[in-house]
Image (cartoon, coloured by chain):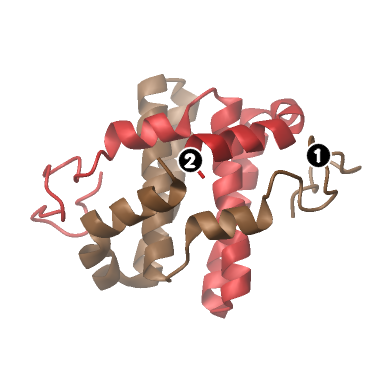
Chain colours: A brown, B red
Amino acid sequence: MHIQEFQNMMQRIYFHRDSQRGTIGTYNWLVDEVKELEEAIKSQDKKAMKNEFADVLAWLASLANVVSIDLEEAALLKYNGRCPKCRKSPCQCPTLPKSRG
Amino acid sequence: MHIQEFQNMMQRIYFHRDSQRGTIGTYNWLVDEVKELEEAIKSQDKKAMKNEFADVLAWLASLANVVSIDLEEAALLKYNGRCPKCRKSPCQCPTLPKSRG
């Protein structure tokens, strides 16, 4: 599924709630889901990890919907097959880990 | 672009660095990018927002690569056109905001 299609699906399912909750409320949910992802990773439970990766992506798409950003367009504007800093693939930036600003 | 294609692109550009940095280091970068997204949203600068949405998605894909999770598969396993809780689209869960666990 295209990134844009996934974002549109989130719009259809959740925009009535996301827009009511607003930008800050939706952002805070994203942060909570990122914390839950950490717990899932630490548990090394693949099912839990999949569930939390799904949630982080879903809330990122919801947040993008609330602020009217096209997530796919934004992603491809910056990451178009090469590292946006060194313009190489694989990335050959000299410094670690500040190579993806 | 498909979610999976974007994740594969991140793999080609960054996996040699992401795998060296490891799971916790990559997770910490994701957290930093989520914080930068907050600042961009507060600034209401569309260009900055696009940049940070791109980074959050990129680091989420990198983290998924490090732990060998297919982000698209995970997302569609949970969000398949309907709310995973109430099974409706649009979501009709009775409670807010705990309707997306």
Q: Is residue B18 left or right of residue B75?
A: right
Quadrant including the N terminus of chain A: top left
Q: Secondary structure at mark 2?
A: loop
Q: Is residue A15 above or below residue B89?
A: below
Whole-percent x, y for residue B70 in the image: 47, 28
Which subunit holds the residue at mark 2? B
Front-most of B68 and A72?
Answer: A72
Give me the disc on residue B48: none
Mark 1 to mark 2: distance in Å? Answer: 22 Å
Which subunit holds the residue at mark 1? A
Whole-percent x, y for residue A21 in the image: 28, 69
Find disc 1 in the rendering and name its residue. A91
Q: Is residue A71 left or right of residue A63?
A: right
Residue B49 in view (yes/no): yes
Find disc 2 in the rendering and name its residue. B2
Q: Residue furthest bottom?
A: B44
The amino acid sitting under disc 2 is His
Q: Is residue A12 above or below residue A68?
A: above
Residue at 61% over, 27% down? B66
